[in-house]
């Protein structure tokens, strides 16, 4: 399979926060933001794999800033690493202030998707070739995150987690 670049999967979704999507403090519901991130990540995973993709896990979510009613929200999702059948998707959420137009990073998340065939069986995905420094950093960190998840799930022995051990022994 031909390796792909992260830019080939980049997905950008922009929308406004409406009253029906807010909590009593007039901020975007966390669940609404999770759904937006899931949709953008799904598109990024499909662009990379050109297969049906399913959410395998939500590995990390950071709600760093609340997103007020009327804000313009941009969700940017990109494949950060491809494994055999799974892909890690890194998501950055940007908020545009409705009064000043100033754009600031509000939240971020990391999802894992699996590519499947028409019967739901996992199928191989193309490798990923990061280009920028940020893409290379996220690519390297993805392996550590995967090993940590496998160790915590009991699917990998801690002694086999070479990338994690390297963090503590170098």
Image: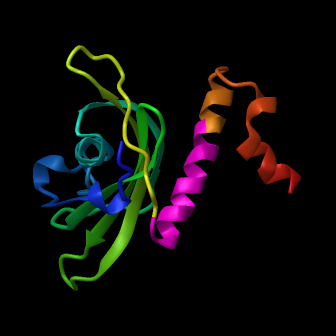
Quadrant (top left, top right, bottom left, bottom right) of the C terminus: bottom right
Q: Is residue 73 above or below residue 98?
A: above
Query: Residue 26, position in %: x, y?
Result: 23, 57
Image coordinates for residue 51, horizontal then vertical, percent:
24, 34
Residue 103 appears left or right of 111: left
Residue 9 pos. (x, y %):
28, 54
Q: Residue at x 45, y 57 (%)?
A: 129
- Closest to the observer: 31 or 140? 140
In the picture provided, is 57 more to the left or to the right than 75? Answer: right
Q: Quadrant of the N terminus?
A: top left
- Picture coordinates of residue 4, whole percent (x, y): 35, 53
Query: Residue placed at 24% from the left, 41% from the top?
Result: 46
Q: Magenta residues?
A: 131-146
Q: Find out whether residue 113 is within the magenta segment.
A: no
Nearer to me, 149 or 81: 81
Q: Toward which corner of the image does residue 95 lie, by quadrant?
A: bottom left
Would residue 133 be counted in the magenta stretch?
Answer: yes
Q: Is residue 163 left or right of residue 124?
A: right
In the image, 150: left or right of 81? right
């Amino acid at each position: 399979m031909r390796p792909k670049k992260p830019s080939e999967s980049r997905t950008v979704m922009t929308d406004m926060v409406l009253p029906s999507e807010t909590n009593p403090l007039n901020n975007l519901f966390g669940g609404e933001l999770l759904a937006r991130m899931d949709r953008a990540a799904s598109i990024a995973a499909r662009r990379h794999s050109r297969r049906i993709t399913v959410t395998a896990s939500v590995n990390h979510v950071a709600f760093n800033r609340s997103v007020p009613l009327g804000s313009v929200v941009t969700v940017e999702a990109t494949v950060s690493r491809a494994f055999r059948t799974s892909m890690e998707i890194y998501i950055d959420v940007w908020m545009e202030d409705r009064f000043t137009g100033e754009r600031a990073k509000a939240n971020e998340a990391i999802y894992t998707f699996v590519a499947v065939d028409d019967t739901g069986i996992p199928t191989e995905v193309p490798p990923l070739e990061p280009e920028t420094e940020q893409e290379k950093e996220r690519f390297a960190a993805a392996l550590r995150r995967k090993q940590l998840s496998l160790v915590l799930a009991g699917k990998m022995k801690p002694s086999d987690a070479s990338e994690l051990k390297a963090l503590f022994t170098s």
